Image: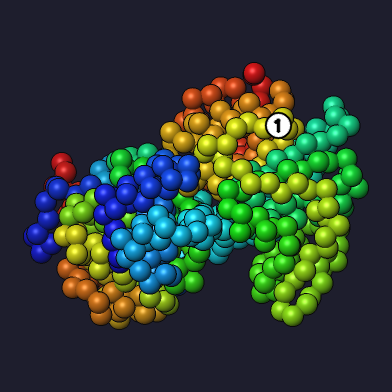
Amino acid sequence: MSRFDLNNKYKAVVIGGSAGSFQGIVKILSHLPEDFPLPIIMCLHRLKHVRNGFVEALSIKSIMEVTEPFDKENIKRGKVYLAPANYHLSVELGNYFSLSTEEMINNSRPAIDITLGTAAYVYRDKLIGILLSGANRDGAVGMKYIKDKGGLTIVQEPSECMIDTMPTAALNITPIDHILKTDDIVNFFSELNKHYK
Amino acid sequence: MKEIDIADLKKITELVKTKYNYDFTNYAMSSFKRRILRILELQNTTVDVLIKKLNESDFLDDFLNEITVNVTEMFRDPPFWRVLRDDILPAIMLNHQKIRIWHAGCSSGEEVFSMTIMLREMGILDKVSIIATDLDTTILERAKAGEYNLKNMELNEKNYIRYQGNSTLKDYYSEVGGKAIMDKSLVENVSFRKHDLVNGEVFNKFDLILCRNVMIYFNQTLQNDVLRKFHESLFKYGYLAIGSKESLIWCDIANKFIVVNNEEKIYKKIKD
């Protein structure tokens, strides 16, 4: 199966999601190939004042442990990261994270546009961006930025989304390489994994 | 998404450094870049015009005000404030008659008011001397004025309830013309001063330093420098509180501190 036409140039995967994305995320994380070699950086809209619980809930389901990075933490292969509540999460040149409490963007902190945009700046064409179900437009600009830098873009099939505003907003402003149902995103990860064996 | 060349960023930091002695060289790149882009957007201008303005006019205060991130809350992370109230301050009081506190990077003062409200409810406000500093004089004036947008008070009140204070936040402010005017007696003994963590000298010794979500805007080199200043500014066995998602473990002098509360990132200086 070569429908995705993949190779092993990629250095990281970023995933954005909001309302209705939790189940999709859980499915993806629970079906990840063992020893998946790339860092997976997730920015999901979440309750601002609830610091605990979310990362644990994802970790239980995930093949790989999910952690919230500390400011200036190095980004490592084969780790799953989640943007902490009430902080924007940026990727810095030098392959580490930084956090910030800047103004909300699209009424969101963490804002998906910031995580996707900074990751695209650092990884350029070696980045895979995935945008899932969500009720606002956050992430669309970030996906366009990934595409502009030559990265690979995937959105969840709008018909499968609980709320399709987010993937639709991305589709409206930039070409998207693959429009996939969650099951196919799972397949995508397993195919990608084969290129690193 | 807009972009700005690193070369242009460097032009700006060089100018501000040589002309005004503010050094943003070691600020974290991604957020600093966003701040510059934000100024360009707010001013509807270009890098060249910005540089011209910085060269010619008294634009520096506005620049500093926009470059620094001034988003803050009262009682942000309520569990942190509970730990301060229930563990840290009682521990300091055991050994000291007078408590000296430094809010480093106090921004618009929400955290200072949180502190003084907490201290008043503990009945020890008169035993504490507080110095609150920021490099941005515009924001210091706002902190001194203690006037906040009423709509922000909703979140502040929610935090206060989760902190489990003795009363309601409404007891500490009055509503005037869409603003929450804080009770000034809370901060009558607070000294608000201009101070730059990057170039500023160590100026006093403290029992407790709060610097939460400030060093996240610095790179690791600068974090190390500032941590050395904090170390020097603390009495032995004094406490340092940083943001819940910050960490000292990568810093050179981390071994001179121990973790007192890992969840809330409160450290104690154990070696000179």
The front one of B57 and B218 is B57
Give the residue type at disc 1.
Asn
Q: Which residue is mark 1?
A: B204
Residue in the image at 34% along x and 63% along y: B49
Residue in the image at 38% along x and 72% along y: B44
The image position of residue B181, as x and y in percent, is 77, 69
SS of the residue under disc 1: loop
Tally of numbered tags: 1
Q: Is residue B78 above or below residue A135?
A: above
The image position of residue A172, as x and y in percent, is 25, 80
Residue B209 visible in the picture: yes
Residue B162 visible in the picture: no
Which quadrant would the C terminus of chain B be assigned to in this image?
Answer: top right
The image position of residue B135, as x and y in percent, is 58, 48
Q: Which residue, as the protein is rendered here, is positioned at the far top?
A: B272
Residue in the image at 56% along x and 22% along y: B255
Q: Is residue B80 left or right of residue B127?
A: left
Q: Is residue A87 above or below residue A95?
A: below
Q: Is residue A145 left or right of residue A7?
A: right
